[in-house]
Amino acid sequence: MSKNIPINTLSRHRAFVYDRIETNAGNAYNSATGKFTAPGDGMYVFHTTTTAFNKSYCTIEVVKNGVVKDIGIADAGDHDDRALSSTMTILSLKKGDVVHVRAGIYGGNYVESDQYARMTFSGFRLA
């Protein structure tokens, strides 16, 4: 993501839209919706990073076709500093399956994505 997200703008299950795209081979990631649509059957690996800043916390949920497959939490809720969370999720996907990252529970000031820490979502087909 290219900028911080104020916590008060989040809603539970809001999809995160990662607008800073480095590589999108095959255009399977939709930068308007934040959703990845599998271009073919296979095993896929997805990685996320999330940063909470100064008395903030946020869980992220990795979702496949509406079902939560992984959860991460960045929790700086009781201190003034950053907290980072990372997930790596291996999923068996069929062509057309949809994977995205959404907000779970949260509180505080904001999740951080700037020159100091970046919120990311990446993935690739393993086999």
Image (cartoon, rainbow, N blue to C red):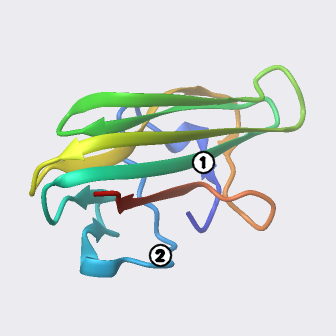
- Along the viewing direction, whichever of 38 and 112 lies nearer the viewer: 38
- Along the viewing direction, whichever of 55 and 86 lies nearer the viewer: 86
- Quarter occupied by residue 4: bottom right
Residue drawn at x 70%, y 37% as measured from the top left: 109
Residue drawn at x 26%, y 77% as measured from the top left: 27
SS at circle 1: strand
N-terminal-most mark, 1 or 2: 2
- Along the viewing direction, whichever of 2 and 69 lies nearer the viewer: 69
The residue labelled by disc 1 is: 49
The spot of residue 55 in percent (x, y) is: 79, 29
Q: Is residue 71 left or right of residue 78?
A: left
SS at circle 2: loop
The spot of residue 60 in percent (x, y) is: 49, 35
Q: Is residue 119 left or right of residue 100?
A: right
What is the three-letter code of the residue carrying label 1? Thr
Q: Is residue 104 left or right of residue 68?
A: right
Quarter of the picture holding the C terminus: bottom left
- Quarter occupied by residue 51: top right
Indicate which disc residue 21 carries.
2
Quarter of the picture holding the N terminus: bottom right
Q: Is residue 41 above or below residue 101?
A: below
The spot of residue 88 in percent (x, y) is: 50, 42
The mark tally for this picture is 2
Q: Residue furthest right?
A: 80
